[in-house]
Image (cartoon, helix red, strand yellow):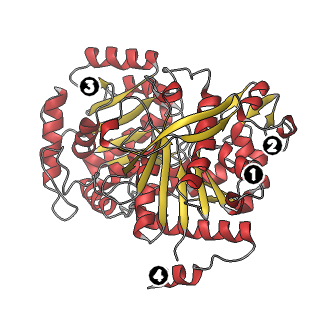
Amino acid sequence: MGLKVMFVSSEVAPFAKTGGLGDVVGALPKALHRRGIDVRVVMPLYAGMNWDALEKLDGPLRIPMWWGTARSGVRLGRLPGSEVPIYFLEYHRYFDRPYLYGPPGSGYDDNVERFTYLSRGALELTKAINFLPDVIHANDWQTALVPVYVNTVEWAQPLHGAATVYTIHNLAYQGIADSGALSITGLGREHYNSGEFEHFGTLNLTKGALRHSTMLSTVSPSYAKEIQTPDFGCGLDGVLHARHGDLVGILNGIDVDEWNPATDPHIAAQYTAARIEGKSACKAALQTEAGLPLDPRIPLFSAVGRLTHQKGFDVLAHSMDRVLSWDLQFVLLGNGDREAEQYFRTLSARRPDRFRAWLGFDNHLAHRIEAGADFFVMPSRFEPCGLSQMYSLRYGTLPIARATGGLIDTVQTYDQATGAGTGFVFGDLTPDALANTIGWALSTFFDRPDHVNIMRKRAMEQDFSWDAAAETYERLYLDAYRHRRGHAFPGRLLAEARRTA
């Protein structure tokens, strides 16, 4: 008998995503399924999805809410390329909207209510389909109420025996609301205390999850350490440090089928670490698409991401005048902060010989940039895990990365004496430090091209598949089960035998 695990998430790729959370929950359950775990996923049914492609299950699901009972529809699909079931909770009042969380720069006023519905609904669904999980895996603040409900409204009920794992994908987002919003959750006022939801006079959903979850995880080992410090803990470092023995950092993987230069249909020429010639054709195609001079001798730098404070694009902007005075080219793809968009739009018009910006997001273009660029710039202030640097490494595009979070765990800095490393890592987040590191990569390209070629091959040979992460998550689930039940999972010997086979 294998483990039974229910994932609850506000977004799952490819159905709906705004960032790394969707990618994780779209991929990790498939890797767990390959390990013999009976895994299911629950998420909302949003506007814009192909509703007709999903099976509509019979009967409404009744979900207790603060105002009464919500009668929810349920639709069933599969994670693409797998047999993993994914259940969609259908309630148009909450989720048939233009945005997942709210317009850019703001959130919907009723987000606490919307995700109370998701959290409570996921638990009601498990009972309705007669799937009583050994572990319920909640993800980020939108599902932070799940472990709380397991410890409260499900007390002495069948679900109370389920262990809960709460994964922090980005601690900067915590689900903070006015204290009066506690009534929307259906929980009594006694839960508004400094050990549960109260945090500096506000309601903090993440704090409640940190208190009630059996085990905690986050998306890289380094980020697990960082969030226990005042610099990265976003006010919850003390709570996290108090539970450090239950907190595990597990590095995210990437979809190695989608991000594979040997089979990628979006790029000009496919290539491998052993036969890397196709990367030159990808660079030429990208230079042409960007309207840059077609010259293989000029190094091509790149950046792809959300133009936000977290990602450090303001620091990149302040370094660009110096960087573009050098013999290089630079392409950028992203959207976000309006001032940042305007700056990079203007710079693209002013320096078309050196710089091209595409404002927006285009997944196919992101693939072409990863394949065609020589270097990839990630000046993040903090980065819980990061996926782009792993895509870059897989495509032989050497990262220039700030030493933070998952970037530390995935990029080994260049050793000029030996040629070791897979990229260029810097510490201080200043325009000078970033420009100096770009200059270091530039000089390496011109003066030590053999080192660049060696690093490219080494980078492409790194294993960032989900298999290693899935094995670690399985161990975490087994530990959570033991903590919750007071004894080992009955099938643990079988699971350990499978791991060592």
Cα distance in 3D space between marks 4 and 3: 50 Å
Residue occupying the point 19% across, 57% down:
262
Compared across the picture, whether 211 is left or right of 349 comes to right
- Residue located beneath label 2 in the image: 196
Cα distance in 3D space between marks 4 and 1: 31 Å
Viewer-side label of 3, 2: 2
- Which element is circle 4 on? helix
Tell me which label, 1 or 2, sits earlier in the chain.
2
Disc 4 marks a residue whose amino acid type is: Arg
- Which element is circle 3 on? strand
- Residue located beneath label 1 in the image: 212
Cα distance in 3D space between marks 3 and 2: 49 Å
Q: Residue 430: where, in percent of width, then height?
A: 53, 32
Residue 356 - label: 3
Cα distance in 3D space between marks 3 and 1: 48 Å
- Which element is circle 2 on? loop
